[in-house]
């Protein structure tokens, strides 16, 4: 899925949250996290994502995906594996086809080369 598409969907989540204290809503925070991620500001993205409760999102798989991606980029294979393993349980996720590849990336970072191959 392209970044532009992810941004558009995240913006849609933000708009959906307007009128309900949207600035502090999970959707607004997720949108802010994606904007920071796209700008290359991983620290801000991670900080925003800490305030996102998956249960409050219409599409929690976006938060799970971003958690995993951030962990990979920050070199934390264990956190990445945990995020993508959780996402793997959501078989209806639009990210489902990519999850095995990200799990392999996480395993590689964790030094589990056979599992990654």
Image: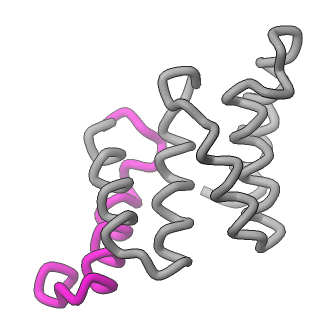
Q: How many tags in the picture?
A: 0
**Could you tell me residue 27's position as x and y percent?**
71, 30
Q: Quadrant of residue 52?
A: top right
**Could you tell me residue 4's position as x and y percent?**
78, 55
**Could you tell me residue 103's position as x and y percent?**
30, 67
Residue at position x 56%, y 66% from top? 70
The colouring scheme, among rainbow, by chain, secondary structure or one colour, is one colour
Residue 75 located left or right of residue 115: right
Identify the image quadrant of the C terminus: bottom left
102 within the magenta span: yes
Spot the residue most to the top. 19
2 within the magenta span: no
Report the magenta residues as a range.
91-117
Q: Is residue 95 above or below residue 113?
A: above
Residue at position x 26%, y 40% from top? 89
**Could you tell me residue 94's position as x and y percent?**
48, 42
Identify the image quadrant of the N terminus: bottom right
Residue at position x 79%, y 27% from top? 24
Residue 46 located left or right of residue 53: right
Q: Is residue 55 above or below residue 47?
A: above
Residue at position x 77%, y 70% from top? 41
Residue 115 located left or right of residue 80: left
- Depth order, front residue of 78/108: 78
């Amino acid at each position: 899925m392209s970044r532009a598409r992810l941004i558009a969907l995240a913006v849609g989540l933000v708009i959906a949250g307007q009128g309900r204290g949207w600035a502090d809503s999970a959707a607004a925070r997720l949108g802010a996290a994606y904007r920071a991620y796209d700008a290359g500001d991983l620290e801000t993205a991670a900080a925003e994502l800490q305030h996102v409760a998956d249960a409050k999102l219409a599409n929690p798989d976006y938060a799970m995906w971003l958690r995993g991606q951030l962990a990979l980029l920050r070199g934390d294979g264990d956190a990445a594996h945990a995020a993508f393993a959780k996402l793997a349980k959501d078989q209806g996720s639009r990210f489902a086809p990519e999850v095995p590849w990200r799990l392999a990336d996480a395993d590689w970072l964790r030094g589990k080369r056979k599992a990654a191959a």
